[in-house]
Image (cartoon, rainbow, N blue to C red):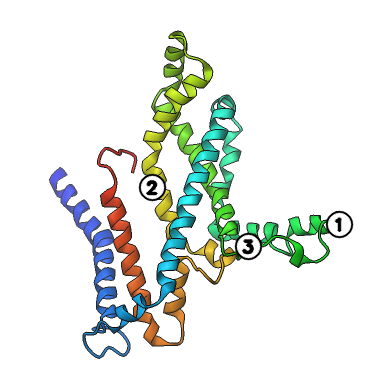
Amino acid sequence: MSRFVGRMGLALFVLGAVFPILFSIIYALLYSVGLMGFGATGFTTAYWIKLFSQSQVAESFLFSAYISITCSLLSWLIAIALFEGFGDFWLRSSWTTFWFLPLTLPAMVSGFLVLQLLSGGGWLARVAYHFGWISVPQDFPIWTNDPYGIGIIVAHLLTGIPFFLLLFRSIWKEAHLAAFDVLAASLGAHKWQIRWRVHMPILYNRSKGNVLLYVLAVFGAYDIPLLVGSQAPQMISVLALRKYERFDLTEKPEAFIIALLYTLLVCLIILWKPSNEENL
C-alpha cells in the first residue's frame, strides 16, 4: 500500500510539476527557432542572431543582477543589524508578529506604496514643498522610474527585511543559539565577541541558501519593476513580456529566447550552489 502511494505521489509530481516545465521549455525552444507558432517557416537561427545583436538584452541581465544582489545584501545586512540590536525584543515580545505584516503585502501594493512615497508628486515631495525645500516637483530627486533602480530596491526592502527577520528568528530557535550564548559567556567572551564569533557564522551559514533563493526571486520579479522601474535599462522580466505583447509578432520568438536564457541562468546558479547547503 505504501509503495503504491509512493508511486502515485511520484506520478502526480511528474504530471503536475515536471511535465509543465519540460513542455514549456520545449515549446519555447521550438518557437525560438521557427518550428512552432505564428509565421513558423522552418528552422532558422535568425531570431537568436537578432536578439544577441541587441545590447539591451545584456544590459537587462546585468541590471537585473545588480538589482537582485543589491536587494538581497541590503535586506540581509539591515535585518541582521536589527536582529542583533533588538534581539531580546524580537524573541520575547508577543507583538513581533505585527512586524512581519509587510510580508503579506502583494508586490503590486509595495510598488504603489513606493510610488506614492518617493515620486515627484509623492508624499515626501509634498512635505519638501511645504517646508520650501523645493519649488516644483522636478526639483525633487528622481527616486522612482530611475536608471539606478532606487525605487525597485526600496520596494523589495519592504518585504525582504521582514523575511530575513523571520528567518533569523526561526534559526535562533532551531540552532539553540541561546545555549551557545551562555556557553560563550561562561568562557569569558564579551557581548560583541559572541555576536561576531557565534551569532554571525551560524546565521550566515544557515541563511545563505535562502539568500540565493531571494536573489533568484528578485531577479525574475515583474510587478515592482513594471511600476517603479525605468524604461532603459529594464529588468529582464519586463523586457521579455513587452517583447511578447508587442504587435510585431516577429518579436515573440525573442521573448521566448529571453525566457530560455533566464531558465538556463537559474539552472546554472542552482547547480553552482555548494552541496553542503541545507536550507535551499
- What residue is at 45 percent from the left and 72 percent from the top? 239
Using the image as rendered, state which of residue 280 and residue 185 is in the foreground: 185
Q: Amino acid at mark 1?
A: Gly
Look at the numbered disc 1 and give the secondary structure of its residue. Answer: loop
Marker disc for residue 107: none
Q: Is residue 94 above or below residue 41?
A: above
Neighbours of disc 3 within 10 Å: few (<14), some (14-19), many (20+) = many
Mark 3 touching mark 1, by CB under 8 A? no
Q: CA distance from mark 1 to mark 2?
A: 44 Å
Q: CA distance from mark 3 to mark 2?
A: 26 Å
Q: Nearer the viewer, mark 1 or mark 2?
A: 1
Rendered image quadrant of residue 266: bottom left
| Residue at image mark 3 | 144
Q: Amino acid at mark 3?
A: Thr
Using the image as rendered, state which of residue 142 and residue 211 is in the foreground: 142
Split into 4 quadrants, where in the image is the C terminus?
top left
Q: Quick check: can you spot residue 1?
A: no
Rendered image quadrant of residue 30: bottom left
| Residue at image mark 2 | 212
How many numbered discs?
A: 3
Q: Quick check: can you spot residue 137?
A: yes
Residue 247 is left or right of residue 253, and the answer is: right
Look at the numbered disc 3 and give the secondary structure of its residue. Answer: loop
| Residue at image mark 1 | 132
Residue 20 is left or right of residue 238, and the answer is: left
Split into 4 quadrants, where in the image is the N terminus?
top left
Residue 37 is left or right of residue 147, and the answer is: left
Q: Residue 267 location in percent, x, y?
A: 28, 57
- What residue is at 24 percent from the left and 72 percent from the top? 26
Nearest to N terminus: mark 1 or mark 2:
1
Q: CA distance from mark 3 to mark 1?
A: 22 Å
Mark 3 touching mark 2, by CB under 8 A? no
